[in-house]
Image (cartoon, rainbow, N blue to C red):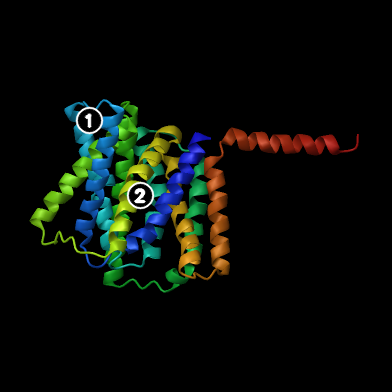
Amino acid sequence: MKSIALYLVTVLIWGSTWLAIEFQLGEVAVETSLFYRFALAAIIMWCWVSVKKLPMQYTSKDHMFFALLALCNFGLNYLMLYWAQNHLTSAMASIAFSLLLLMNIINTRLFFGKPIAKRIYFGALLGVIGIGCLFWPQLQQFDLNNEVLVGLLLALAGTFVASLGNMVSVRNSKQHIGVMQGNAWGMLYSAVGLFCYLLVSDASMRFSAPASYWYSLIYLAVFGTVIAFACYFALLKNIGPERASYVIVLFPLVAVTLSTVFEGFMWQANTFLGFSLVLIGNAIVLTPTKRIHAFFAAKTLQQKSTLPS
């Protein structure tokens, strides 16, 4: 039950951040917005761990992995994905990012030698196909010119970097590092790293922006970063990266729903098909094999009991 709650919170929050990010683009440089986001998140996280008096002393090796976590999950991946959206539509970027599920499955096998059940591959494939169905009209208009190719490569590179960050989080959990402590250090290193990047780049650290920018920034920092990452990394620890990362496939479903409510998105046949495939794939990935076998065994026994003797 706890994992289900964490799963739902992560999906709903991260799925809604696509809409919030729209208010971040435009007047303020992406690098600056990300610095504000993770600096605010780091302050909140450190206030939390201080109030809770959580242990924050770690070895230099652990700090190396905190820095890797910052680079992969709180920094470079976001920069690449934001840059990618300068060349791709948000739909195309979200489709590319949904491949995080498959990358996590493969990386879990490579880095930790964990065998992956065949049903998880099948469920993941259904999920990715479902995403493709959801955005089939955009895929039909796909033109592989130089600009789009650059955007696609950036999106895939950002997704791969994020997957490596997920592996770092799994490593931290195996070393009995608390989720909140690891995130606090990671977000602090991310804020420092982004600030250093701003110093050597030509990005402006302007503060003049509409109120909607600051409201969305607070939402992204508090909910999209502090709360959602805490829930997601807890899922990585509880149910493993191959199943926890399926929340990535569900993000576009939330985005489509919000677009229906707030932007008048029109549902088509491909929308219903995509939803169905993603939900079926989700059920396959999240349902243990023993439970599936038990279900069909019970059905078979029930049918036999109804046959005339």
Per the image, label 1 sits on a secondary structure element best described as helix
Q: Residue at x 51, y 58 (%)?
A: 130
Q: Residue at x 30, y 43 (%)?
A: 164
**In the image, what residue type sits under mark 2?**
Gly
The reply, left or right, for residue 279 in relation to residue 153 is: right
Per the image, label 2 sits on a secondary structure element best described as helix
CA gap between label 1 and label 2 equals 25 Å
Q: Is residue 213 above or below residue 175?
A: below
Residue identifier under label 2: 224
Which picture quadrant has residue 27?
A: bottom left
Residue 12: x, y in percent? 45, 50
Residue identifier under label 1: 62
Q: Residue at x 30, y 26 (%)?
A: 175
Q: Is residue 73 above or below residue 32?
A: above
Q: Nearer the viewer, residue 94 or 288?
A: 94
Label 2: how many residues lie within 10 Å, few (<14), some (14-19) or many (20+)? many
The reply, left or right, for residue 71 in relation to residue 22 is: left
Mark 1 vs mark 2: give the one in front: 2
Disc number placed over residue 38 in the picture, else none: none
Residue 223: x, y in percent? 36, 48
Q: Residue at x 32, y 57 (%)?
A: 215
Q: Nearer the viewer, residue 135 or 58?
A: 58
Residue 92: x, y in percent? 38, 64
Residue 296: x, y in percent? 69, 38
Label 1: how many residues lie within 10 Å, few (<14), some (14-19) or many (20+)? some
Q: Is residue 217 visible?
A: yes
**In the image, what residue type sits under mark 1?**
Asp
